[in-house]
Amino acid sequence: MERWIIYAFVSMAFAGFTSVIAKLGLAGISGDLGLTVRTCFVFVFMLCFASLTVPLQDLQLLTWRNVIWLGASAVTTTASWIFYYKAIKAGNVSTVALIDKGSVVIALALSYWILHEAITLPKMLGGLLIVTGLLVISRG
């Protein structure tokens, strides 16, 4: 199995824990405050991670194009997190997390349209199953 696939599964596992742990952390406070505190921790942890793993000479590789696209990604991540935390504060984590995974379908469509990645039959069927699951969840 390729390393990136292992990384994706590890990411999936941590993301699953993240939602449940976040819901516990939101007890008695607003989702906005909880997200702010969490994001401060993420910032510190990422600085520590980068200081241990990113060679200083790599900073020379950073272009304005990188900064602009990563900044745009930060804007969409921020919007996603704001609404995700509002949703898990008010709703069931199990339902919110499943609906949130509908982002896979959006990523599939955008990767085809913008990045010109191939949409294979397995990807198309997987996306269709996700949409079907979203319809089932939203009606129940």
Image: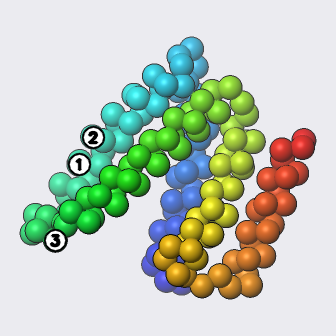
Distance between mark 1 and mark 3 Cα atoms? 20 Å
Q: Nearer the viewer, residue 4 or 36?
A: 36
Residue 98 against residue 57 in the figure, above or below: above
Q: Are marks 1 and 2 in contact (CB under 8 Å)?
A: yes
Distance between mark 2 and mark 3 Cα atoms? 23 Å
Identify the residue at image location x=55%, y=51%.
Answer: 15
Q: Position of residue 77 (x, y in %)?
A: 46, 48
Asked if residue 87 can be seen in this view, the reply is yes
Q: Nearer the viewer, residue 96 or 110?
A: 110
- Residue named by callout 3: 61
Spot the residue most to the front.
113
- Residue named by callout 1: 48
Q: Position of residue 34 (x, y in %)?
A: 48, 26
- Residue named by callout 2: 44
Identify the residue at image location x=58%, y=65%.
Answer: 107
Which amino acid type corresponds to the residue marked 3 in the rendered image? Leu
Which amino acid type corresponds to the residue marked 2 in the rendered image? Val
Residue 27 against residue 135 in the figure, above or below: above
Q: Please identify the quadrant where the C terminus is shown.
A: top right
Q: Secondary structure at mark 2?
A: helix
Kindly indicate the quadrant of the structure image that contains residue 28.
Answer: top right
Q: Nearer the viewer, mark 2 or mark 3?
A: 3
Q: Secondary structure at mark 1?
A: helix
Q: Nearer the viewer, residue 75 or 127?
A: 75
Q: Position of residue 135 (x, y in %)?
A: 85, 52
Q: Residues within 10 Å of mark 1 (few under 14, many from 20)?
A: few
Q: Are marks 1 and 3 in contact (CB under 8 Å)?
A: no
Identify the residue at image location x=49%, y=41%.
Answer: 79
> Would you say 137 lies left or right of 24 here?
right
Identify the residue at image location x=52%, y=62%.
Answer: 10
Which amino acid type corresponds to the residue marked 1 in the rendered image? Cys
Q: Position of residue 127 (x, y in %)?
A: 73, 69
